Image: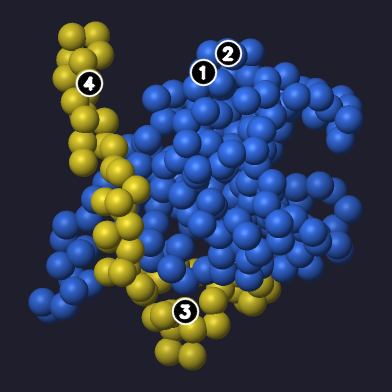
Chain colours: A blue, B yellow
Amino acid sequence: SSSGAGALARNPHPLENSWTFWFDNPSAKSKQAAWGSSIRPIYTFATVEEFWSIYNNIHHPSKLAVGADFHCFKHKIEPKWEDPICANGGKWTMTFPRGKSDTSWLYTLLAMIGEQFDHGDEICGAVVNVRNRQEKIALWTKNAANEAAQVSIGKQWKEFLDYNDTIGFIFHEDAKKHDRAAKNKYVI
Amino acid sequence: DQTDQVIDGCVVTVKRYSRDFLLKLAEQCTEVPEGFEITADIAEALMSANSNSRDPQ
C-alpha cells in the first residue's frame, strides 16, 4: 500500500533511548494497599512516530481522573525509588493549577525524548500527578549528589517550558525518610 | 536533527530532535501502534474516547 501510514512505517525516526509509558490507575489504587502495586507499563516506544501514535490517543493530564499518575521513563528504569538506577536520585518538581499542565507535560516529554538536555544521561524520566487542586510534573534524575548536573537540568527544564516560578530538587532518600517534610536540596 | 559527538576517538551520533521538528511529525501519527494492547480497566481511564483504535469494536 502507498498509504501515509505505510510510508511512515518505512521511514521512522529512531530515538536515542527507548521509553516506557506507565500508568497508575486511581480506581485500582484505592483497592490495593501496597504502594506501587497498581502501577503498570503501558507501552515502550523507540521512534518519534510510535511516541505520537500513543500520545495522540491517550488522555492528557487535564482529562485524567484525580489521583492518576502518568509516567514516561527510560526503558528498563522503573518509576520507583527502589529501582537501582533511581535509588540515589532525586526529582525537580513544577506545580500547575488543575487542568493547566498539558502543554508543559508535552514539552517535557519532547525535551526528554529529543535529547535536548545537556545532561540527558542523568535523566530517568518524568511523571505527572493529577490531584484535586493541582497537577505536578516531576523530572527524575539519577545522581542526586551531582549538583552541577541537577542544576543544569533544572535550569534547562525551566527554559524549555518557559516556567518562571522557583523549583526545588528533593533527594529520594530524604523523601523516603521525611515524606512531605523533605526539604529541597537545590532551588533555582 | 542529529548531532555528532566524539567520544573516546569515535564519532558517535546522538539522535537529537528539536521540539519544532518533533511537533511537525505529530499529525501523521493518529492510529495506535500495531500490537498495542491495553486492559479494559486502564483503557477507560487513559484512552481518548475518539481514539483511532485498530480494534473493530
Residue where numbered disc 3 is placed: B51
Q: Which mark is residue A149?
A: 1
Residue where numbered disc 4 is placed: B5
Q: Residues within 10 Å of mark 1 (few under 14, many from 20)?
A: some
Q: Are discs 1 and 2 less than 8 Å apart at CB?
A: yes
Q: Are discs 1 and 3 less than 8 Å apart at CB?
A: no
Disc 2 sits on a residue from what chain? A
The residue at 85%/48% (across/down) is A34
Of the pair A109 and A96, the residue shown nearer to us: A96
Disc 4 sits on a residue from what chain? B
The residue at 79%/59% (across/down) is A133
> Is A81 drawn above or below residue A113 in the view shown?
above
Q: Are discs 3 and 2 less than 8 Å apart at CB?
A: no
Question: Is residue B56 shown left or right of residue A68?
Answer: left
Question: Is residue A21 shown left or right of residue A165?
Answer: left
Q: Give x and y (percent) for residue A57.
A: 47, 71
Give the Cα distance between marks 3 and 4.
39 Å
Question: Is residue A174 shown left or right of residue A16?
Answer: right
> Is B37 drawn above or below residue A72 in the view shown?
below
Identify the element where label 4 is drawn. Answer: strand
Give the Cα distance between marks 4 and 2.
23 Å
